[in-house]
């Protein structure tokens, strides 16, 4: 759905984005993360056709951002990282304005506005003035705006920034709904645990360069060299370690205070063979689990902290 091909952007002598290649498949929710100044907003604005690349290009829903910007705009919903000021405009007028800009016929707009207000839980604010809304409501309204033309691709630049925990949860629930509607999402954020619960893929950039991209499990496996298993046995911990060490699928074993950490590098989904081996050798296995993917740890391990503020 999004195919970024060598996208490059320079501001004067600064290369904000340096030859980025990245694929987002239909129905993916990709978290786009990186330190301040990494080039996330720059990338998203180019995909939304609001900024011209210096080199490279991207296809969005099959259309080239440089050759067919109109076609791209019709298929993309872009949520910027700040909300403008709209003096004396009512919520429904605001949405009507954007729907009209996307050439949604007047006869369909009323119903459409009702739908997006309901989805974003703003129905009771229909006639309120935009400037009277709280920040969280504005954020939701901004999301409602990006949906008025029923885009296939959503480019969301820090959709949950500056919100209280409750409002953040609401935005996240809303984004999950959008995933169910088979939209393709590219979401930049600094709030990593939030992305982990929402995104099936992540891409990490730093100083305008891609550090890594893939599914959470893939990236975690790349960095640890396998799946990390946490195992507890009732007794004979040392012997259990020796047994694990001898298994072909286990590449590394460490033990601390009766808690064994083993790195598994066998076929996917075959971790239970390790458990079977322990049980058949008569070990009382108290705990056996795959370590949860820790997005924050991945982020810290894969970025060097260059250029962060
Ligand atoms: N209009 C501009 N003129 C000059 N430099 C710019 C401009 N916009 C961005 N930059 C620079 O380009 C780099 C990338 O900025 P960008 O806003 O894309 O980063 P970001 O990843 O979105 O950061 P943040 O997490 O802080 O939002 C930064 O070094 C920034 O200072
Ligand atoms: Mg940004």
Image (cartoon, grey):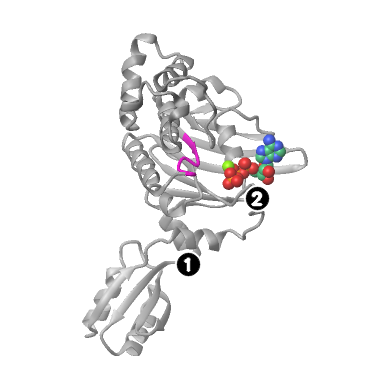
Residue corresponding to mark 2:
207
Q: What residue is shown at x 39% (from left), y 10% (from top)?
A: 105
Q: Which secondary structure type mostly characterizes the magenta part of the structure?
A: loop
Q: Is residue 117 above or below residue 191?
A: above
Q: Residue 238 at x, y = what percent?
A: 35, 89
Q: Is residue 230 visible?
A: yes
Q: Quadrant of residue 287?
A: bottom left
The C terminus sits in image quarter: bottom right
Q: Nearer the viewer, residue 60 or 147?
A: 147
Q: What residue is shown at x 51% (from left), y 21% (from top)?
A: 71
Q: Nearer the viewer, residue 163 or 75?
A: 163
Of the two numbered discs 2 and 1 on the same chain, state the one appearing first in sequence.
2
Q: Residue 10 at x, y = what percent?
A: 71, 38
Q: Residue 169 at x, y = what percent?
A: 36, 46
Decide if ligand 1 comes within 8 Å of the CB at mark 2. no
Give the SS element for disc 1: helix
Residue extent of the magenta highlight: 155-162
Q: Quadrant of residue 128?
A: top left
Judge left or right: residue 104 versus residue 33: left
Give the SS element for disc 2: loop
Q: Quadrant of residue 84?
A: top right
Residue corresponding to mark 1:
224
Circle 1 packing at 10 Å, graded few (<14), some (14-19), many (20+), is few
The N terminus sits in image quarter: top left
Tell me the tag on residue 301: none
């Amino acid at each position: 759905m999004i195919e970024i091909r060598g996208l490059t952007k320079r501001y004067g002598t600064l290369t904000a984005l340096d030859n980025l290649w990245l694929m987002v498949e239909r129905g993916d929710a990709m978290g786009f993360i990186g330190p301040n100044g990494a080039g996330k907003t720059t990338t998203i604005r180019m995909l939304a056709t609001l900024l011209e690349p210096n080199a490279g290009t991207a296809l969005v829903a099959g259309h080239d951002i440089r050759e067919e910007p109109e076609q791209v705009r019709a298929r993309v919903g872009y949520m910027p990282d700040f909300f403008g000021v709209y003096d004396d405009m009512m919520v429904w007028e605001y949405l009507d304005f954007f729907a009209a800009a996307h050439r949604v016929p007047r006869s369909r707009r009323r119903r459409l506005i009702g739908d997006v207000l309901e989805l974003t839980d703003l129905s009771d604010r229909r006639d309120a003035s935009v400037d009277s809304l709280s920040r969280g409501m504005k954020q939701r309204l901004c999301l409602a705006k990006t949906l008025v033309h029923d885009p296939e691709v959503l480019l969301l630049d820090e959709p949950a920034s500056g919100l209280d925990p409750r409002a953040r949860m609401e935005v996240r629930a809303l984004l999950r709904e959008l995933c169910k509607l088979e939209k393709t999402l590219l979401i930049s954020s600094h709030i990593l645990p939030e992305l982990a619960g929402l995104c099936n893929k992540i891409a990490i950039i730093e100083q305008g360069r891609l550090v890594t991209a893939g599914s959470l499990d893939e990236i975690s496996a790349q960095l640890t060299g396998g799946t990390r298993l946490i195992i507890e046995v009732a007794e004979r911990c040392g012997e259990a370690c020796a047994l694990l060490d001898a298994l072909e699928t286990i590449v590394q074993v460490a033990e601390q205070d009766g808690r064994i950490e083993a790195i598994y590098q066998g076929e996917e989904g075959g971790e239970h063979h390790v458990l079977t081996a322990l049980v058949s050798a008569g070990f009382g296995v108290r705990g056996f689990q795959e370590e949860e993917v820790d997005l924050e740890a991945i982020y810290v391990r894969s970025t060097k902290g260059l250029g962060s503020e």
